Image (cartoon, helix red, strand yellow):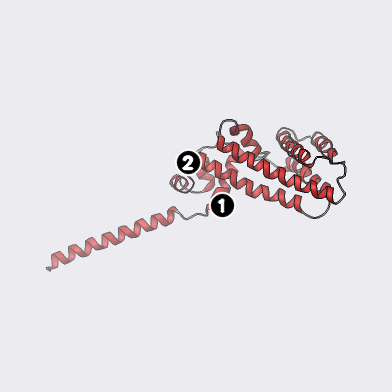
Amino acid sequence: MNIEAFLFLTVRSRKRINSFKGKNSQMARHKEFDRDQALHKAMEVFWSRGYNAASIQDLVKHMRINRQSLYDTFGDKHALYLQALDRYGEVEGRKIFELLEQQGSVKKSLRQLFGGVVEGSLCEGQRRGCFMGNAMSELAGRCKETAARTCSNMTAAEGALYRALLRGKKEGELKGVRDPRAVARFLYSSLQGLILMAKATQDRKTLEDVVKVTLSVLD
């Protein structure tokens, strides 16, 4: 092999290696983000703005990823929204389950649950309501996938309330509750209504009156 051919092959090999390294480095940069953290940030955008008002630009800016990373990792905007709903169900649902499953007075746990909504509405700068409740009113009526997720969340929350009521009856605290399943459904409906009201008003007396009458079903 002459010197010209040797130099030609050497240069071409180096170009291939550099090109390969460049692609690998781009791919590494492309995926350099925490998926769960990015999804949580997407949840915050949808929770605050709703589905229709949240733009792709809003999402990539808050998630701190580029558009291609969003599409490659989560799919389109609608797919990301559904995953954000799942994320909300896991994170916020866990808080409710832990509260209702704690040992001690069931009435006290329920007062904490409803009272937390009141206190949160009075101190929160941006009253976002419940992401699941927002999804019910915005998309569930015309999107089967959203409806399925909100119904699943509703069933899970109802189940947690039901189990708490059964425990209260068993321990003799809730003797007046005759139909725990119906009461659990009523409590969930009232909780969503209270959260919705709290988006519009910060009048403590109004919200506390709702809580007082709602929890009277436990007496």
Depth check: 107 or 21 in front? 107
In the depicted structure, whether residue 35 falls above or below residue 7: above
Q: Which residue is mark 1?
A: 37
Question: Is residue 160 rendered to the left or right of residue 169?
Answer: left
Is residue 188 visible in the rendered image? The answer is yes
Going 80% across and 50% down the picture, which residue do you hit?
167
Question: Is residue 66 rendered to the left or right of residue 7?
Answer: right
Is residue 49 visible in the rendered image? The answer is no
Residue 148 x %, y %? 59, 39
Going 79% across and 36% down the picture, which residue do you hit?
207
| Front disc: 1 or 2 | 2
Between discs 1 and 2, the one toward the N terminus: 1
Which amino acid type corresponds to the residue marked 1 in the rendered image?
Gln
The image quadrant that residue 16 belongs to is bottom left
Which amino acid type corresponds to the residue marked 2 in the rendered image?
Asp
Q: Which residue is mark 2?
A: 76
SS for tag 2? loop
